[in-house]
Image (cartoon, helix red, strand yellow):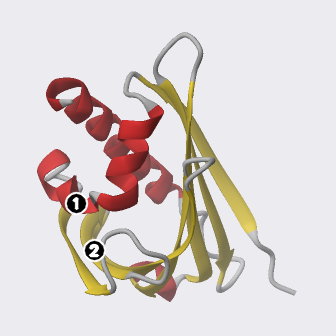
Amino acid sequence: MAQLTKIEVQLEIKSSAESFYEVFRSKQHLFPIICPDLVKSIKVIKGDWESVGSIKEWDYVAGNAETAKEMVEEIDEKNKAISLKVLDGEATKYYKNMKFTLQVRGMEQGGSSVKWTLEYEKLNKDIPAPTKYSEAFQVLARNVDAFLSKYA
């Protein structure tokens, strides 16, 4: 039986939970501007930038140049969380299922806590954990935080 595995990354940022979440929620088109070395392009294939069921296609660098199609599975406005499922692309050659969840919470002393969870299922036991995606997320999150600090 296949096993679903999780990787979690948690980091603190200076930006407000609202502004950081909003970029990931409905302004992903800014990613190639905010982090051009990581995200080369992102476009809507179906739906729009912010609705459940919308599908986006990414060209990005995570160790090497890759593409992916992802679908917005769930949006939880109250808890500032969004879940995305990978439908196609480089990752699907190695992982049967892959789902990313981002949750942002404001902190009492200012700034926010960002939790990013990657759930995945390997196609076989010899495939390594997809840690390059958690590393890429950390770069993206820090760049979004810096962008918001500069322009918000």
The amino acid on which the numbered mark 1 sits, given as a three-letter code, is Val
Screen quadrant of the C terminus: top left
- Foreground: 117 or 26? 26
With 150 as the anchor, is 90 left or right in this view? right
The amino acid on which the numbered mark 2 sits, given as a three-letter code, is Trp
Tell me the tag on residue 11: none
Which residue does the image show at 14% across and 53% down from the upper left? 36
Q: Position of residue 54 (x, y in %)?
A: 40, 82
Which residue does the image show at 20% across and 62% down from the upper left? 29
From what the image shows, is residue 61 above or below residue 11? below
Q: Marks 1 and 2, Cα distance to the nearest angstrom?
A: 7 Å
With 82 as the anchor, is 65 left or right in this view? left
With 111 as the anchor, is 37 left or right in this view? left
Label located before the other in sequence (1 or 2): 1
* Among the 4 quarters of the image, the one containing residue 40: bottom left
With 17 as the anchor, is 41 left or right in this view? left
Which residue does the image show at 42% across and 50% down from the upper left? 137
From what the image shows, is residue 90 above or below residue 28? below
* Image mark count: 2
The residue pinned by badge 2 equals 58
Residue positioned most to the front: 78
- Foreground: 118 or 53? 53
The residue pinned by badge 1 equals 39
Q: Position of residue 26 (x, y in %)?
A: 33, 60
Screen quadrant of the N terminus: bottom right
Q: Position of residue 98 (x, y in %)?
A: 58, 75
Q: Secondary structure at mark 1?
A: strand
- Foreground: 98 or 123? 98
Label 1 with label 2: CB-CB less than 8 Å: yes
Q: Position of residue 31 (x, y in %)?
A: 22, 55
